Image (cartoon, rainbow, N blue to C red):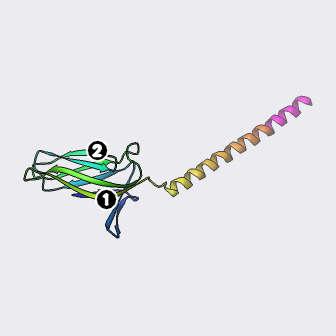
Amino acid sequence: MAVAIDSEQGGVEPSESGALVTLVRDEVALVSGVGFMAGTRADVWLFSEPALLGTVTIDENGEFSGEVGIDPDLIPTGEHTLQLQGVGTDGYVKAANMGVFVDDAQPDLAVAEQAGLDLSFIWSILAVILLVAIVVAAWLRRSRRA
């Protein structure tokens, strides 16, 4: 079984007990495996609270590859166990487990800074428009009195 995380925030890091896999909510992870019975399916589960992340079909070579999503409405942040279940070539159900940490996506600082710049630019334009409106109103008021 293999899990690949195509994310700048998720990934695999070394830890005291081996490796720590970090999955990011609202993103996808690529799962793959070999050594399964052709034509069957493999289920990908996330435990503490059981949640089926996805099901993939085993091809004629006994291999599979597919994407599973980490739904933020179903999966809380924290430590979990990722489990792959499938039928082995011998006909018996096989399961492989790995510890994972599920985290929220961290905001992209460059995007946040750009949004802040865009917002301040909009406020500046609104302030200029308001100032021009006040000057025009004052000029119209004076010209009507004269």
Which contiguous range is marked in magenta? 135-146
Corner quadrant of residue 103: bottom left
Task: From the image, tell me which residue sits under label 2.
Answer: 52
Badge 2 local density, few (<14 within 10 Å), some, or many (20+)?
some
Magenta span has 144?
yes
Q: Position of residue 87 (x, y in %)?
A: 13, 49
Q: What amino acid does circle 2 point to?
A: Leu
Left or right: where 133 falls relative to 92: right
Q: Looking at the picture, how far across and down is residue 146, in whole percent?
A: 92, 31
Q: Amino acid at mark 1?
A: Gly
Quarter of the figure that contains the N terminus: bottom left
For residue 138, above or below residue 40: above
Residue 6 included in the magenta stretch of the image: no
Q: Residue furthest bottom?
A: 16
Q: Quadrant of residue 82?
A: bottom left
Query: Quarter of the image holding residue 52?
Result: top left
Mark sitting earlier along the chain (1/2): 2
Q: Which residue is mark 1?
A: 99
Q: Residue furthest top?
A: 144
Tell me where residue 78 appears, x and y as whole percent: 40, 55
- Image mark for residue 108: none
* Rendered position, 126 above or below 19: above
